[in-house]
Image (spheres, rainbow, N blue to C red):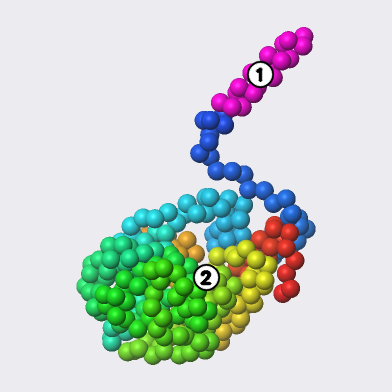
């Protein structure tokens, strides 16, 4: 009997080893050994209620997929080509699927938001995208860096060296970027509440720390076949690791929600396509009936709830990590 038990154990061990070998590329199950389950339950369901049915996809991505299944969340932004396109009158998407970049034709040159991962992408993706839209690299007169993560500023130095745009970032972002090899040369500092008018477009800037210390958010007008809307472009919704940064992010999101409400923001634009659902919106725009709704225009109430829901998702992640926040 003992011999049979040993044989059975050996067989089980062999099968386990075989299974591990067969599925070694499967992603690991995410566990939260310090989870505060009651707090997760509270904030997760509050976030779900805040999102409501209209924002359920945004809620699922930020509160669940990105936290419990981070590998799947990352897979939603694998590097890949996206055809450049005009999204609003004179506002163009010129990024790739891993990270977004936007260009606004102001009538006095292009204002470009973010510069992709590196010089190769700036040269091989961003500029050719502009050329397909009828512009040239020399049309880039202003470059705005939304925050100090390399996927957003990695191509900035190449753009500076070749086209010499005025380059803007917040002071904390510059402090980080100038110490990185290949980073941009420090140029213009955007401070809290700064207003930049270029041509016929006015950009209102706010420093919104949390995702990074130097995250920069913007409010500006956009037009859909001449119909005016107001866009809110939050500088970074990805959840930071440290509890103090999470506190900052929640405060920034709620403050920007208040600012957006005052400005009647009704349009959501982001610097990653899985944060504003650009890939879905592009297909909807391709098949938009005459007079149909613009998918980026989600309405003022929904934009407010989007930001506050994201703040609640930060609380969910803190509770999963066993952190106690001050806010």
* Callout 1 secondary element: helix
> Where is residue 188 shown, x and y percent of the image?
41, 85
Callout 1: few (<14), some (14-19), or many (20+) C-alpha neighbours within 10 Å?
few
Image quarter for residue 157? Answer: bottom left
Q: Main secondary structure of the magenta part?
A: helix
The tag earlier along the polypeptide, 2 or 1, is: 1
* Residue 22 forms part of the magenta stretch: no
* Residue 10 forms part of the magenta stretch: yes
278 sits left or right of 32 in the view:
left
Q: Of tags 2 and 1, which is closer to the observer? A: 1
Tell me which residue sits at (64%, 75%) in the image. 248
Callout 2: few (<14), some (14-19), or many (20+) C-alpha neighbours within 10 Å?
many
> Where is residue 20 shown, x and y percent of the image?
57, 31
Tell me which residue sits at (32%, 81%) in the image. 165
Above or below for 185 versus 108: above
> Where is residue 315 shown, x and y percent of the image?
68, 65
Chain part drawn in magenta: 1-18
Above or below for 89 versus 61: below
Quarter of the rendering occupied by the N terminus: top right
* Callout 2 secondary element: loop
Image quarter for residue 280? Answer: bottom left
Tell me which residue sits at (24%, 78%) in the image. 138
**Real-space CA distance between mark 2 and mark 1, rounded to the nearest whole angstrom:** 51 Å
Q: Which numbered tag is attached to residue 10?
A: 1
Tell me which residue sits at (56%, 87%) in the image. 262
233 sits left or right of 117 in the view:
right
> Where is residue 139 shown, x and y percent of the image?
25, 79
Note whether residue 182 is visible.
yes
Quarter of the rendering occupied by the C terminus: bottom right
Kindly identify which residue carries mark 2.
236
Image quarter for residue 250? Answer: bottom right
């Amino acid at each position: 009997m003992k011999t049979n038990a040993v044989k059975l154990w050996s067989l089980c061990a062999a099968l386990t080893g075989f299974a591990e070998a067969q599925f070694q590329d499967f992603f690991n199950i995410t566990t939260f050994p310090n989870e505060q389950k009651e707090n997760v339950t509270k904030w997760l369901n509050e976030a779900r209620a805040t999102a409501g049915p209209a924002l359920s996809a945004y809620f699922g991505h930020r509160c669940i997929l990105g936290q419990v299944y981070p590998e799947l969340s990352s897979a939603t932004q694998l590097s890949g080509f996206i055809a450049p396109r005009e999204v609003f009158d004179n506002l163009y998407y010129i990024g790739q699927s891993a990270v977004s970049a936007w260009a606004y034709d102001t009538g006095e040159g292009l204002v470009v938001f973010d510069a992709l991962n590196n010089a190769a992408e700036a040269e091989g993706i961003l500029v050719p995208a502009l050329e397909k839209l009828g512009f040239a690299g020399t049309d880039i007169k202003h470059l705005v860096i939304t925050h100090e993560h390399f996927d957003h500023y990695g191509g900035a130095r190449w753009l500076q060296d070749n086209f010499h745009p005025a380059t803007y970032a917040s002071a904390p972002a510059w402090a980080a970027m100038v110490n990185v090899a290949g980073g941009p040369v420090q140029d213009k500092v955007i401070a809290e509440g700064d207003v930049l008018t270029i041509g016929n477009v006015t950009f209102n800037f706010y420093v919104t720390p949390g995702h990074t210390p130097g995250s920069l958010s913007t409010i500006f007008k956009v037009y859909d076949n001449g119909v005016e809307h107001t866009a809110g472009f939050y500088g970074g919704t990805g959840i930071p690791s440290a509890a103090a940064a999470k506190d900052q992010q929640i405060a920034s999101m709620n403050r920007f929600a208040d600012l957006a409400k005052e400005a009647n923001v009704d349009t959501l634009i982001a610097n990653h396509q899985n944060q504003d659902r650009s890939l879905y919106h592009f297909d909807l725009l391709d098949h938009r009936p005459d007079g149909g709704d613009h998918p980026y225009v989600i309405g003022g109430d929904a934009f407010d709830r989007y930001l506050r829901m994201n703040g609640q998702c930060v609380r969910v992640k803190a509770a999963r990590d066993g952190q106690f926040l001050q806010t």
